[in-house]
Image (tube, rainbow, N blue to C red):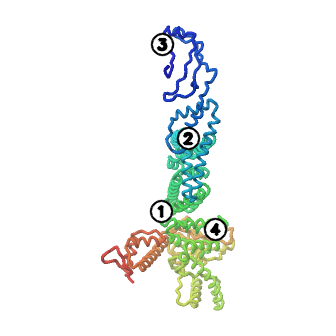
Amino acid sequence: MAEEDSFSSSATTSQEQEQLENRNLIVPSVAADHHTDDLTEASTTLSGFAGVKLGTGSVKKLVIRNFKDKPLILENYTEEAWQKLKEAVQAIQNNTSVQYSLEELYQSVKNLCSYNLSANLYKQLKQLCEQHIRAEIHQLREYSLDTGPFLKKMDKCWQDHARQMIYQVSFENKFLEETNRFYAAEGRKLVQKKEIPGCLYHIKNLLEEEVDRVRAYLSLNTQKLLIAIVEKQLLGEHLSAVLQKGLSYLLDENRVEDLSLLYQLFSRVECGVQVLLQHWIDYIKKFGNSIVTNPVKDKTMVQELLDFKDKIDFIIATSFLKNEKFIVAMKDAFETFINKRSNKPAQLLAKYVDSKLRAGNKEATDEELEELLDKVIILFRFINGKDVFEAFYKKDLARRLLLGKSASVDAEKSMLSKLKQECGTAFTNKLQGMFKDMELSKDIMIQLKQYMQNQNIPGNIELTVSILTTSFWPTYIPKEIQLPPEMERLQENFRNFYLSKHSGRKLQWQSTLGHCVLKAEFKKGKKELQVTLFQTLVLLMFNEGDHFSLEEIKMATGLEDRELRRTLQSLACGRARVLIKNPKGKDVEDGDRFFCNEEFNHKLFKIKINQIQEKETIEEHTITTQRVFQDRQYQIDAAIVRIMKIRKTLNHNVLLSELYNQLKFTLKPSDLKKRIESLIERDYMERDKENPNQYKYIA
């Protein structure tokens, strides 16, 4: 018979039908072309076709029945089949070629199992594998226990063992290929269709499901390979796409839990954390730039930066497990964007500190203020132009000290200590000198009081003077004014007293910093007015007359026009109007006349009349900035001379490199070139005659 028997009623002749009628057929099964088993009958032999009666052109009924008795197995077949299997397993274990085909080995196993020999077959295979493993372990025991080679040998044995398992060759590889193909498509779909939070949680669920499936159905050795494929296709291939789609949203909305999951998932993928780190840096720089480079946000810049820093710190601690790389990257990013706008952040930071240390600030307790100052110092640490901060901080500190506007001496000294710790003694020497001047002034006032009592100097005005060392304090522009005779006598008395103890010193009065307490009597009661010296000069005129014009007040006080108008505006147009302006209006105009407001009334006895404060004038800002730049020139000159004195001869580019390393503020090559030229002109150094780019130090 042929290998395949086909039956077709239309193809059977009538003669054949008669011969086959009422006849039982036995159709033996046919073995594979290349193999004949040694069984008496094939195990899959079919029983006859009983009761088949072929009619003309149709089959009425076909019934297939099994043999009643299974054919007997040939003698020695079990031993011969096992020998084949044993040789094949040993060939695999020894990494040699197998003599038999897989089909032949498969058929042998199938035949043995069909005769209920599977348990014995399993036992023999198990023993064979255990013998091989024991032999391998015995070799390891005899191997050198040197950690590196021993572990490499053990790893090789394990890899060989895993590679030899039929599970890996016949199932695992194909399974992993299909898994890779499936999740490649799933990954593309996820990134395109799902929002970032949903995408992350879906990936997390898929990974958990795969782990559960491996533990339930597969070898645990498959888990690592399988999970690596899932991670790669769902995340590894789409790292930037996922971050571009949703990282900014998660950070803007402070989605801490989602960010934690994002970090955990990216940590599982090769280069995942590094890619996340780069996008993290880009986000910080972009967000920071939007704060620093936008002049509209100048009023809120520092507070926004502090809030942003708090937010970033919390995310690093909570979501990124305090990863040191993210901390360092954050610091570098802050330093980059905060210096994009030269000098302005330093100036605004000093102003912010002034607002927190000034009297009247009731926003925070002492502990909260201390914590806030610590955060300010961290921002200060990122700023390159620390000398700009120092200049504006010093100017504001001077006002707080001289006008008694400091909220807390302890807070002031705490801030000073933090700056000293951050920048060194040289940075805070002048600031400490300001505090020292204020303490010495208190002692001098005690001595002045005794002096005036001993000299029997009459007068009902109590004078308090602060003696300021010029080099410690900001630069103030002296303003000439006309003082009342009583005040002039007091100044002269103090001058005589002070110079008698400190001969050779020069005193210069700073009228812009003076302030007074005046006792005033109105129809509705007595009041104490806390006013500036300029306001005092105007108010004292009304002891001599009922009304004065703008021009008359200007002649009598000697005040500069803009200063006078601001002073009159504070007295006649502010909240506490002790003067009346005619005609009425918010601004002081030429021809205006001023009267004493005898009907003035206020619920408080002590009334502070604030001067109308201009925003920091262009003049003041220019003076402060010029002083910073002048100080920088001195620092550059000193650094150049110091370097050249040590090196004697130096190339231009090397000199610039040294200066960049030593100086702590932002430098332009053109500025350095000007300072080098200045030092050459002053004979501190010279150019090499043969090489203009080479400098020589002149002793």
Q: Is residue 394 above or below residue 173?
A: below
Measured Cα–Cα span from mark 4 to mark 3: 106 Å
Q: Secondary structure at mark 2?
A: helix
Which numbered disc, 3 or 1, marks the residue that appears first in the sequence? 3
Marks 3,2: beta carbons within 8 A: no
Q: Is residue 605 left or right of residue 593?
A: right
In depth, the one of 171 and 337 nearer the eye is: 171
Q: Secondary structure at mark 4?
A: helix
Q: Which mark is residue 11?
A: 3
Pointer 1 residue:
340
Which numbered disc, 2 or 1, marks the residue that appears first in the sequence? 2
- Image spot of residue 558 (x, y percent): 51, 78
In depth, the one of 55 and 376 nearer the eye is: 55
Measured Cα–Cα span from mark 4 to mark 2: 76 Å
Marks 4,2: beta carbons within 8 A: no
Pointer 2 residue:
89
Residue drawn 65% across and 35% down? 119
Which numbered disc, 4 or 2, marks the residue that appears first in the sequence? 2
Q: Secondary structure at mark 3?
A: helix
Q: Is residue 53 above or below residue 435?
A: above
Mark 2 vs mark 1: give the one in front.
2
In depth, the one of 534 and 410 nearer the eye is: 410
- The amino acid beneath tag 3 is Ala
Pointer 4 residue:
370
Measured Cα–Cα span from mark 4 to mark 1: 28 Å
Measured Cα–Cα span from mark 3 to mark 1: 94 Å
- The amino acid beneath tag 4 is Glu
- The amino acid beneath tag 1 is Lys
Measured Cα–Cα span from mark 2 to mark 1: 71 Å
Q: Which mark is residue 205?
A: none
